[in-house]
Image: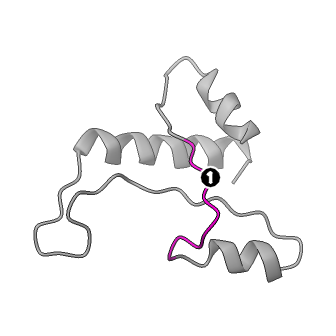
Amino acid sequence: QAWANDIDDKQEKIKIQPVVTGRPGGTNTDVLQLFGGDCETAHIALPIKNLHTAVEICNWNDIDNTVKLVCELIISGKL
């Protein structure tokens, strides 16, 4: 989570909400981290209402901020 603090110190604030769960989250990040050798993982997710239905809803600001976050991680060399 150190990368989150580095991103937060940037001039343009990117709001994030770190979450730690004790159960698998439906992605391969848990398996990669446990059995992928020297492999760090980060599960970056969007808040989506009505997930896996025909009427999913997502806020455009959340999408824009997720893109900014991933771009900043790539530019900083942390991803």
Q: Is residue 56 above or below residue 61?
A: below
Q: Residue at the right extreme?
A: 38
The one nearer the camera, 26 or 45, is: 26
Tell me: 26 left or right of 9: left
Q: Residue at the left extreme?
A: 55
Tell me: 7 left or right of 2: left
Tell me: 60 left or right of 78: left
Q: How many numbered marks have been drawn onto this rendered protein structure?
A: 1
* Residue visible at 72% across and 77% down in the picture: 32
- The quarter of the rendered structure image containing the N terminus is top right
Magenta stretch, main secondary structure, is loop
* Residue visible at 54% across and 49% down in the picture: 70
Q: Amino acid at mark 1?
A: Val
Percent position of residue 36, x then y: 80, 80
Image: magenta residue range: 18-26
* Residue visible at 52% across and 56% down in the picture: 44
Quadrant position of residue 10: top right
Q: Is residue 41 above or below residue 75?
A: below
* Residue visible at 76% across and 72% down in the picture: 33
Q: How is the image coloured?
A: one colour
Helix, strand or loop under label 1: loop
